[in-house]
Amino acid sequence: MLKIGVLGAGHIGKFHLNNWKEIENVEIVGFFEPSDEIAAEVGKTYQIKRYLSAEDLLDRVDAADIDAPTNHHFALCEMAVRKGKHVFVEKPIVKTLEEGRKLINMVREANVKVQVGHVERFNPAFLSSKKYINQPLFIEVHRLAQFNPRGTEVSVILDLMIHDIDIILSIVKSDVKNIYASGVGVITETPDIANVRIEFHNGCVANLTSSRISMKKMRKLRIFQKDAYIGIDFLEKKTEVIKLKHPSDSDVFSFDIDTPDGSKKTIAISNPKIQDSNAMKAELESFVDAVVNNKPTAVNEIDGYLALEVAHKILEKTHHNKVLAAN
Ligand SMILES: NC(=O)c1ccc[n+]([C@@H]2O[C@H](COP(=O)([O-])OP(=O)(O)OC[C@H]3O[C@@H](n4cnc5c(N)ncnc54)[C@H](O)[C@@H]3O)[C@@H](O)[C@H]2O)c1
């Protein structure tokens, strides 16, 4: 039995508790939550013990599940790692790059496993499209949400765009060359809406738009590559692939087009079958598997740091553009 302690039992902490209950070979030892009101509700709903100190809880577990607001991630991760505990920490890994570097060193010394909650890696729509992704040349992403005060301790870039930054870094195997960004703080002091262009050394360009002040939700990523277009809808869990038809493609809708040299090409449109799954449960299960079987975690502290590094470069650019606009 892997003994787990949940630190922070708000919105995401409760979702995790629902999933931990369903995962085999896991014992929920208890939770640490500073709000009495939330703690009372969680204690009653889940019938688990509330610890009044994070230290006390950490002393009794094998692994910490850190679901506190982002500005508390570093202190809680540090406490857990110094005690030799494995850590699952919600995204973004920590708030600042300095915290990220310190944490990476501590993790190396303590030799513990860290997984960051970049849950879109486990989204069934993304998983079903992965096999079609091959050297993207151009990526267009929209992640739009209605305003919610939760998460506003950080900008929309660290709160929402970081999901797409992580996905893009996982599929574009190249270093970032240039970043152009513009962000506007409408309701908070940090950007609530941002548009970013990331150019990679291998020539790929990604355009990202994230907003937390939209009327409607949207989470769509579109990939254009030499031989195909792949559309991934993270919210509706749908995938569309449009590509030149291969003789082995069966059961696909197809049509012919005339090419400039007079020949015909056949275009195939398909909606790959989505293996329905619970992404959050899958990411927690993969963490347990990594700890119990001593395997690498699916999204480790370095992946978390690399996404954070790009996010901070974007923040610098949005700040620079704000200063230019004010002068
Ligand atoms: N993976 C995702 O899709 C996803 C979605 C939402 C939020 N998140 C992340 O999860 C984290 C929490 O977000 P949320 O929406 O659940 O926020 P929330 O405000 O609903 O919950 C956070 C909880 O942590 C508690 N808390 C505050 N300080 C604490 C501390 N020092 N130790 C322990 N608990 C503390 C708060 O009282 C609150 O109950 C954030 O880092 C956020 O970025 C991830």
Image (cartoon, rainbow, N blue to C red):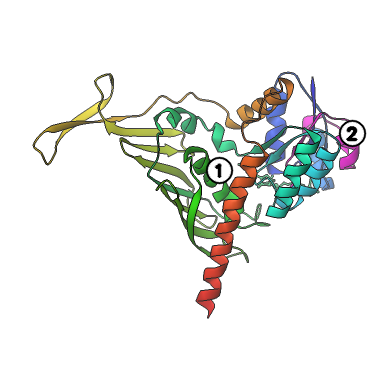
**Residue 270, percent from left and from top:** 32, 29
Image-based side of 220 in relation to 8, left or right: left
**Residue ID at (49%, 57%):** 179
Local packing at callout 1 (Cα closer than 10 Å; few below 14, some 14-19, many 20+) is many
Mark 1 / mark 2, whichever is N-terminal: 2
Check residue 234 for magenta coloring.
no
- Tell me which corner region of the image, top left, top right, bottom left or bottom right, holds residue 90: top right
- Residue located beneath label 2 in the image: 59
| The quarter of the displayed image where residue 283 is located | top right
**Label 1, label 2: how far apart the Cα atoms are:** 32 Å
Residue name at image x 28 percent, y 18 percent? 248
Q: Which mark is residue 166?
A: 1
Any part of residue 186 in sight: no
**Residue 304 appears in the figure:** yes
Picture residue at 41% right of the left edge, 24% below the top? 273
Secondary structure type for disc 2: helix
Please name the amino acid that badge 2 sits on.
Asp
Image height check: is 234 above or below 96?
above
Residue 179 versus residue 29 in the image, above or below: below
Per the image, label 1 sits on a secondary structure element best described as helix
Residue 225: quadrant of the picture: top left
- Crowd rating for badge 2 (residues with CA inside 10 Å; few <14, some 14–19, many 20+): some
Q: Where is residue 65 drawn, in percent x and y?
A: 75, 36
Q: Tell me where the magenta segment starts and ends, as one range.
A: 45-68
34 or 258: which is nearer to us? Answer: 258
In this view, the residue farthest toward the bottom is: 327
Q: Is residue 3 left or right of residue 211?
A: right
